[in-house]
Image (cartoon, coloured by chain):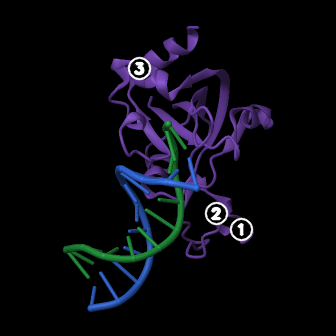
Chain colours: A purple, B blue, C green
Amino acid sequence: MNYWLMKSEPSEVSVDDALSAPKSTVAWTGVRNYQARNYMRDLMRVDDGVLFYHSSCAEPGVVGIGRVASTPYPDPTQFDKKSHYYDAGSKKEEPRWQLVDVQILKKTRTLGLPELRSVAALEDMIVLKKGNRLSITPVEAKHWRLILKLLDQK
DNA sequence: GCCAACGTTGGC
DNA sequence: GCCAACGTTGGC
């Protein structure tokens, strides 16, 4: 079993949006970065753990726990001309962008960036590294366990 | 709004 | 293949 941190802008899809969706599940649309896509397409498995992270907002941080809820399939927004994520270069027979569904299991308190950075044992987390912009990053098991513990405190 | 850091594009 | 220009991300 693997663990992942997945960023979402709450103005697009917040943890509350995900919670109120059918089965608390959302398709992770709009990823247009090859490395992030490859994680979803090649490495994610159903039931992998997901840290739901809010980015580009007042209080960035981990806001929920979820799971990978599907195998990979083509991101429908790449074919939707009206979508912000439309990709004219992607063909139906050979879709460029694949995604997975993510199910929210629990909304947590906000474990914000300053708090994450204050924990020495988390300093190796990719999301905390300078210049990191990847919207999906793998999370080590030891970091996952520690974050779950931190989320239960306070 | 600013800006550092990064990814992508395209000319050569 | 190089690399400058450009666009985007995302914290502050």
Look at 37% across and 31% down and name the residue there. A125
Tell me residue C2's x, y (percent): 20, 74
Depth check: give the residue in front, A137 or A100.
A137
Q: Callout 1, which amino acid?
A: Asp
Determine whether label 1 and label 2 are within 8 Å by CB. yes
Q: Which residue is mark 1?
A: A80
- State yes or no: discs 3 and 1 in contact (Cβ < 8 Å): no
Whether residue A149 is situated above or below residue B9 in the rendered picture: above
Above/below status of A7 relative to A121: below
Residue that carries the numbered disc 2 in the rendered image: A85
Which one is in front in this view, the residue at disc 3 or the one at disc 1? 3
Q: Are marks 1 and 2 on the same chain?
A: yes
Amino acid under label 3? Ser
Q: Is residue B5 left or right of residue A20?
A: left
> Element type at marker 1?
loop
Chain to which mark 1 belongs: A
- For the point 60% across and 54% down, the residue is A73
On the question of residue A16 being in view, the answer is yes
Mark sitting earlier along the chain (3/1): 1
Q: CA distance from mark 1 to mark 2?
A: 8 Å
- Closer-to-camera residue (A119/A1): A119
Q: Determine the image quadrant of residue B10.
A: bottom left
